[in-house]
Image (tube, rainbow, N blue to C red):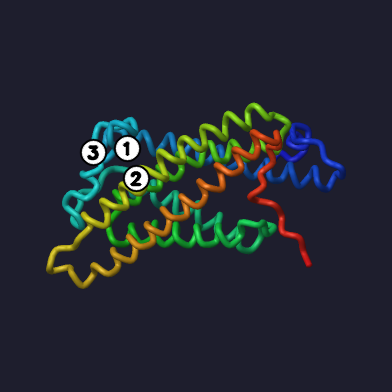
Amino acid sequence: MGLPWLMIVCKDEETIEKKRDRAHRAGANLYKLIFYTITSIYGYIILKDSPILPWYLGGSGNLDNIFTGMPYQEKIPYHLEYCLIQLGYFIEDFTHHLFFKERTSDFWEMILHHCLTLTLLSGMILQNIVRVGIVISWLHTFSDVTTASTRFFSQTPQKNATIVSFTLCIIFWILCRNYCIPLVTYGSIMGNVYPPELAEWQNATDILNFFLLCLCLMHVYWLTLFLNMYIGGIVSGITDDKQRGVLKKK
């Protein structure tokens, strides 16, 4: 993504190869920043007047309405389409991460995360639990805006921008991924119960709920890493992304 101009704005390196690698990482995160920003705005537009987005997320609904009438829920315009867009993005990102991207120290973490995400999105579409899927997907994407911007700025000399972006990243991460997503997960476990005539399909929903719990645990794990990097960056003044160091080939 615009490698020449990215090489200009990135941090200086000892060799041109390292500079080019840093520019590649900056470009990848700039692409993600643009995608997350657009899909966050689009998601908010289709969620804000729906009955499922609560006031503290800028809506006029209630999270309890996510589970009303399950599994025979009335379709809300564009919610399924949003989930399909997200599913397509994660299929591409998973394929690129697995087969084309240079392996970094968080390779297996991201493989696990992508497998959980792909299973949850596709499973919730197939089980007609789209309301759960779109809320979690939007929260996930919204919190990733500042994650991508932080990783972009960390490849540049802009330390202040990196620190501000990382501060916002941690705040939004805690709100979206460590509070709201667990809240929706708990509601899904308690509220997504099939009626007796569909009881044979309950196991599928229970498996999806288990994967949601796994996702919540990964978010807690990543928060501890973020806080460790944040404190270490403030103390040392180093703003490089330590989590995604390239693995050395043996």
Q: Residues within 10 Å of mark 1 (few under 14, many from 20)?
A: many
* Residue at the image point whose x is 59% and y is 38% from the top: 230
* Residue at the image point whose x is 56% and y is 54% from the top: 93
Q: Which badge, 2 or 3, is on the more N-terminal residue?
A: 3
Does the residue at mark 1 contact the one at mark 2 (Cβ under 8 Å)? yes
Circle 2 sits on which residue?
A: 135
Residue nearest the viewer, comparing 130 with 116: 116
Mark-to-mark CA distance, 2 and 3: 11 Å
Whole-percent x, y for residue 127 in the image:
29, 61
**Which quarter of the figure has residue 12?**
top right
One can see residue 248 in this view? yes
Whole-percent x, y for residue 83 in the image:
39, 50
- Quadrant of the snapshot with the C terminus: bottom right
Q: Amino acid at mark 3?
A: Asn
Does the residue at mark 2 contact the one at mark 3 (Cβ under 8 Å)? no
Residue situated furthest bottom in the rendering: 200
Mark-to-mark CA distance, 1 and 3: 11 Å
Q: Which badge, 1 or 2, is on the more N-terminal residue?
A: 1
- Quadrant of the snapshot with the N terminus: top right
For numbered disc 1, what is the local secondary structure? helix
For numbered disc 3, what is the local secondary structure? loop
Circle 3 sits on which residue?
A: 62
Residue nearest the viewer, comparing 164 with 100: 164
